[in-house]
Structures are given as C-alpha cells and as structure tokens.
Image: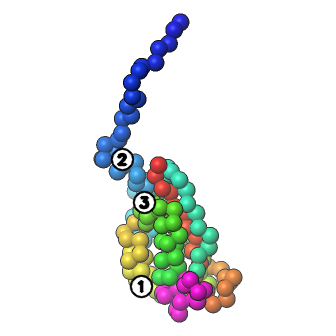
Amino acid sequence: MSVTTPKGPQLAVLPTAAEDDTRSRAQVLQPSGWPMPKGYANGIAAEGRIVVTGGVIGWDVEERLADGFGAQVRQTLSNIAAILAEAGARPEHLVRLTWYVVDMDEYLANLKELGKIYRTIFGAHYSAMALLQVVRLVEKAARVEIEATAVIPR
C-alpha cells in the first residue's frame, strides 16, 4: 500500500470571526432555575493558557498600602489587572477571584462602592468568586487580599 502526500502549500481553515469570538469567551455556568447571582458567576468554563496570581494586596510599587478598605480594594484590583496584562490577559479572561477580608462587616457595608470599583477596573465581566473572612493577613494593615485566575484562549 502506497500513501502519497499532496504537493504544494498546506492550507489551514481558520475560524471565522464569529467562531473565533465564541471560542475566546468563557462560558458562564448558570444552572436552570437558579437565581441570577449579583456581582459574580456560579461557575465559568474556559479553555486556554492559565494565568494565576498570588495573593495580591492593595499596595503601590513602593509597598505603601492604600488608606481605607475601598482604596485597598481599588489598588488590589488594579494590581491584579497589571499582573494579568503581563501575560496578555484581559478582564474578560478572569475565571475566578478568591477574596480574603479581615472584616466581613466592612466588606458588606461597602458593597455598592466595591461594585463601582470592580466595574471601573474589570467592566461587567463577573468571574466565579469566593469570599472568606480571615483573622489577619501577612501585612498587618492590609484589609483585603485577592487571588485571581484567568484563562487566555488559544
């Protein structure tokens, strides 16, 4: 049995813009009949290159913590956006955020402000999220620490 290979250039079928756009988006997992979550997703499915941050806090490049809970959240999310950008990730590539706060009541009292801060930095894309209260963070004055996971489509 003889196998012949075609001569000439190999052609690849590239996805159309619509197919490529669909493939590049994470799939929000929302079970039928469940109430719509506010400010987060129940689950996300995505394929591609995984980008993970460590625990990120609200300090600047000189390791000065922002003053106040909202300001620390703003700086923390900005720091996460900068880390993700280093890998070529954009806000829509976020699939998970895990928040660690030292005071749950402080978090709950600032929900409206936090929502505005989040949308300013990441837009209306909401990843799966978890929120935990902890006794303290490594940096004593830190009020919040966030870990992020993003998936950049191939």
Mark 3 → mark 2, Cα distance in angstroms: 29 Å
In this figure, which residue is indicated by the disc labeled 3?
34
Magenta highlight on residue 149: no
* First to last magenta residue range: 58-73
Q: Helix, strand, or loop for circle 2?
A: helix
Depth check: give the residue in front, 43 or 124: 124
Q: Is residue 68 left or right of residue 17?
A: right
Q: Helix, strand, or loop for circle 1?
A: helix
Asked whether disc 3 touches disc 1, contact meaning CB atoms under 8 Å apart, the reply is: no
Q: Which of the two discs, 3 and 1, labels the residue nearer the N terminus? A: 3
Q: Quadrant of residue 130?
A: bottom right
Q: Going by the picture, which residue comes out furthest to the bottom?
A: 67
Q: Residue at x 41, y 21 (%)?
A: 7
Q: Nearer the viewer, mark 3 or mark 1?
A: 1
Q: Quadrant of residue 8?
A: top left
Asked whether disc 2 touches disc 1, contact meaning CB atoms under 8 Å apart, the reply is: no
Q: Nearer the viewer, mark 3 or mark 2?
A: 2
Q: Residue at x 49, y 88 (%)?
A: 71
Q: Position of residue 61 (x, y in %)?
A: 56, 83
Q: Amino acid at mark 2?
A: Asp
Q: Is residue 64 visible?
A: yes
Mark 3 → mark 1, Cα distance in angstroms: 26 Å
Q: Which mark is residue 20?
A: 2
Q: Is residue 43 visible?
A: no
Image vertical order of residue 52 relative to residue 14, above or below: below
In this figure, which residue is indicated by the disc labeled 1?
113
